[in-house]
Amino acid sequence: MELPFNEAGVSVTRTALSAAGQVFPLRDIDDLRVVAGRRNRGLPIALSLIGVAIAAVGGAYGSGAGLGCGVMMVVVGWLAWIWQDAKHQLFVVTGGESREAVWSNDLAFLERVEQAVRAAKAASAEASAARPAVQ
């Protein structure tokens, strides 16, 4: 049996999606959707603006400590921006109920999982349509 997709603990077979200890039979999956997470902008911007203000006041009064603290706050704000991860989620709709199946920091990975599930569902539908009806 060929596994169409098996990566990072997520596998898609001809019959099911298995992820994070959950198994979703393909026949029960009505729809899939990927929700892209966003980074929090407030904290990094606030830290950087406070740092700029402290550095400006420290520079205006000739205070090396104020200038140094302000520059360090700007750097901390920048680091808070680049180190934070956006949590992306793949939701599976079964029986009208939406459940989170997988989350990842890599949006492209979740899109590959979604494409693999849709391809497996299409292949399963073609195989069942090609199968002759037994009486």
Image (cartoon, rainbow, N blue to C red):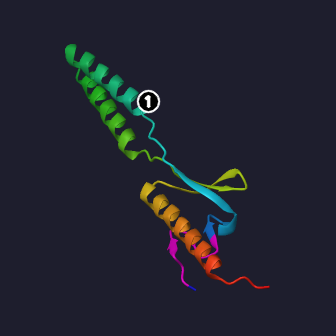
Q: Measuring from the top left, give residue 10's x and y in whole percent.
A: 56, 68
Image-quadrant location for residue 75:
top left
Q: Which residue is mark 1?
A: 42
| Quarter of the picture holding the N terminus | bottom right
Q: Is residue 66 above or below residue 22?
A: above
Q: At x 44% / y 47%, what residue is drawn?
A: 85
Residue drawn at the location 37% of the way across and 29% of the way down? 45
Considering only vertical position in the picture, is 24 above or below 89? below
Left or right: where 57 falls relative to 18: left
Residue found at the far top of this picture: 61
Which one is in front, 93 or 6?
A: 93
On screen, residue 39 above or below 89 = above
Is residue 115 at least partly visible in the picture?
yes
- Residue 57 magenta-drawn? no
- Identified at 44% across, 40% down, the residue is 39
Please state, as top left, top right, bottom left or bottom right, where the C terminus lies in the image: bottom right
**Residue 116 higher or lower than 82, as above or below:** below
Question: Can the viewer see residue 11 in this picture?
Answer: no
Circle 1: residue type: Gly
Q: Find residue 27 and report its image quarter.
A: bottom right
* Numbered label tally: 1
Q: Tell whether 83 sits left or right of 61.
A: right
Residue appearing at x 51%, y 64% in the figure: 113
Q: Give the percent coordinates (x, y) of residue 130.
A: 61, 81
Task: Decide whether residue 11 is among the magenta residues.
Answer: yes
Q: Where in the figure is residue 109, as x and y percent of width and height?
A: 45, 61
Q: Residues within 10 Å of mark 1 (few under 14, many from 20)?
A: few
Between 95 and 69, which is closer to the camera in this rendering? 95
Question: In the rendering, at what x and y percent does residue 107 appear?
Answer: 44, 55
Please provide the residue range marked out in magenta. 2-16
